[in-house]
Image (tube, rainbow, N blue to C red):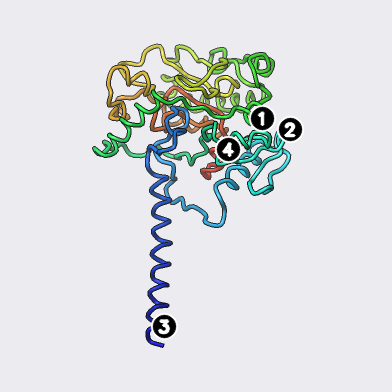
Amino acid sequence: MKKFKTYTGALLVSVIIGAVFMVFILTTVNILAVEDNEASFESESIYLSQVQPGFQPTPTITRAEQVMKALAEAYPRQIDRVEFRRGDWAVLLRGTWYYFSEGKMLPENLLSQASSYSPHGFYNYQAELPLWRTPSEEEQERLRNASDLRNQRQIRRSPHFFDTLWRAGNHSEAYERVKTMRFLGQPVTVHFMIMENLSLVEETILTAAKTNSQVQAWINSIGRIESWQWRNISDTQTRSYHAYGLALDITPRSYGGKETYWLWTQRSRQDWWNVSYNERHHPPAEVIKAFEKYGFIWGGKWLFFDTMHFEYRPEILILSGMPAESRR
């Protein structure tokens, strides 16, 4: 009996230690800036930290369920329902079921070809920009390897889900969906379904500018705003959100010697990851918050930074516990 109790106690301790270790591993994997998955090497899907302060993974809900329910909440006009079917979570989008398929978002007829695609970036976005710190030697080596691997291996994500979501599977279809509007005094061409949200962003920024000289100075410094353009992300086979009319690159007349895009920085210095926030061209915090308030994320919070870039991704904000005030 004594041996049985000892064995039972040891087993219980082992189970507890194992559970704690798994939580540690999950948290560590999320916090690491660069993953071993090839999807991590795309500049438009990497972030400084995947875990919000205080965020705890819910063990009873899979990531697949979280993502698909976030998509259904973000796009209620396009997605009819979400359910678990045929062993995976799926959403019914415009009459077609799309399956999570380990983040690859594939229709049923392409599930057998899942190995041909990289996962999409469904991540937890930072509410605040983390404090800057110099990466350790180990982290720098991983970043160096990640950069080299990105240049050698082409990322290819299935465009089918987002093509269907925005009804923009080719240049002609995308052109039919975009409209030109004024934003902060500049003409921009965006998908018609986000025009109201972008107008609300502008209203919020202009209101802030009345009492905040930094915001007004930032508006005055804008040289141009690049919006819709049918193209892939630089050096990849993955469709850019610019191709759907969902992204803006807001560039100033002068960067004042500061950096804005990691890939451009890499051309002049290999250790692009050591470029501190003070060396980067950042919009005022009030501008970033205005975009986030209405469903946009900012590329300055990605590890592979792109500080001029904003894109409409309300599902990312929902996954991160940052509800937008207006979603379409």
Q: Are marks 1 and 4 in contact (CB under 8 Å)?
A: no
Q: Judging from the image, what secondary structure is the residue with disc 4 in?
A: helix
Which residue in the protein does label 3 denote?
4
Which residue in the protein does label 4 denote?
315
**Closest to the observer, 290 or 2:** 2
Q: Are marks 2 and 3 in contact (CB under 8 Å)?
A: no
In terms of sequence position, does the residue under pointer 2 or pointer 3 come before the other? Answer: 3
In terms of sequence position, does the residue under pointer 4 or pointer 2 come before the other? Answer: 2
Q: Residues within 10 Å of mark 2 (few under 14, many from 20)?
A: few
Amino acid type assigned to the residue bearing label 2 in the image: Arg
Q: Nearer the viewer, mark 1 or mark 3?
A: 3
Amino acid type assigned to the residue bearing label 1 in the image: Leu
Q: Are marks 2 and 1 in contact (CB under 8 Å)?
A: yes
Which residue in the protein does label 2 denote?
94
Furthest residue to the front?
A: 112
**Where residue 204 sits: x, y (%)?**
54, 28
The residues bearing labels 2 and 3 have C-alpha atoms spaced at a distance of 59 Å
Q: Residues within 10 Å of mark 4 (few under 14, many from 20)?
A: many
- In terms of image quadrants, where is residue 264? top left
Question: In the displayed structure, does residue 9 sit left or right of residue 119?
Answer: left
Q: Judging from the image, what secondary structure is the residue with disc 3 in?
A: helix
Amino acid type assigned to the residue bearing label 3 in the image: Phe
Q: Judging from the image, what secondary structure is the residue with disc 1 in?
A: helix
**Closest to the observer, 181 or 42:** 42
Q: Residue at 65% across / 21% down in the picture?
A: 169
Which residue in the protein does label 1 denote?
165
In terms of sequence position, does the residue under pointer 2 or pointer 1 come before the other? Answer: 2
